[in-house]
Image (spheres, rainbow, N blue to C red):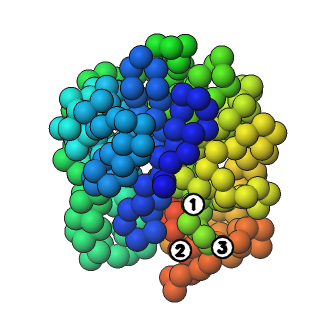
Amino acid sequence: HNEFRIHPQVVQIGCYWGDGGHTELYLLQGDTLAIVDSGVNDTPAKYIAPALETYGLTLGDVDLILNTHGHHDHAGGNGELVAASGAKVWIHEADARAAEDPDYQFDTYFANRDILVGRSDRLEASRVKMKVTAGQPAKVDRRLADGDLVDLGKGLRLRVLRTPGHTRGSVCYYWDSEGLAFCGDSVMGQGSRPGGLPLIYFPDEYERTIEKLLGLDIAALGLGHHYRTHVLPRDSVHFGSSVKAFLRASREIADTIGDSLRKAAAARPGAGFHQVARAATDLAAERLPITKGEDGLPLTGSVEAFYGYWQLLK
């Protein structure tokens, strides 16, 4: 089974996709049946339906999809789930367009993976692959804002916390009274794939997000993936003192990436991004477990993370 109950009203559902992708969804059982994120295009049929069956429910019983952000591995199942249930889709206003328009999402978030390393020849294949997992997008029914309340009944009241950095409209759904926060990819440790780096697109906002979450009394932090750190097991839910340990480790990893990029750039005035990023990789690898590909960059997440800090420099 890919599901387990982390609270009497919350079931975590794991889904696999693509080559080694794994996303965590959260079923919330109030008077309204809501799910935090929908995975990729085939997740509703392959993973959500069997999990619901365990509790005598079907896809048709889902009332509401609460997206943590608009990326294909979190909102790619929206279309299928809406078709099966008529569920409403709620997402932060800054991520609505990414969820509704896969081409815009690709151009904004994923095209740089190929462009910045001089591999524009791979762009169309990458786009096609991402659009498969992004599925048939559903229209967004409500655009959320920071501080909105989502009352699902039976005491399940969530506060929308805007936590950008991974995307502009990333949010956490925070159940104050229980101290539960469902954060998607708002905080990412060292990323979910071995040897890579986290996909930090907007580093200045990311660091503010971590400070914001460190200021809350979170008893359980539900993540969107099995994020790695050097200090904790690769759990997708952290409890108790592990919450702050995970947040602090994530902050330290982000600082290492930023420091490495700034040092590499300072030592190479006038050098282009690609050259600086390769040098930054070597510096970061002194402090983080990084696996380099043949282009001298970490295998995943590197271009995005370094480029975010590069743009701050510029």
Q: Give coordinates of residue 124: x percent, y percent.
A: 22, 68
Circle 1 residue = 192
Residue drawn at 28 percent across, 26 percent down: 88
Q: Residues within 10 Å of mark 2 (few under 14, many from 20)?
A: some
Q: In which quarter of the image is residue 220?
A: top right
Residue most toward the bottom?
294
**For the residues carrying marks 3 and 1, which lies nearer the camera in this image?**
1
Q: Between residues 234 and 97, which one lies in front from this camera angle? A: 234
Q: Disc 3 to disc 1, how far (Cα)? A: 12 Å
SS at mark 1? loop
Q: Name the mark on residue 290.
A: 3
Report whether residue 163 is seen. no
SS at mark 2? loop
Residue 76 in the figure: left or right of residue 231: left
- Residue contact at pointers 1 and 2, CB within 8 angstroms: no
Q: Give coordinates of residue 196: x percent, y percent.
A: 58, 68
Question: Which callout, 3 or 1, points at the residue further toward the start of the chain?
Answer: 1
Q: Residues within 10 Å of mark 1 (few under 14, many from 20)?
A: many
Amino acid on which disc 2 is placed: Leu
Residue drawn at 77 percent across, 73 percent down: 286
Q: Disc 1 to disc 2, how far (Cα)? A: 12 Å
Amino acid on which disc 3 is placed: Ile
Circle 2 residue = 299
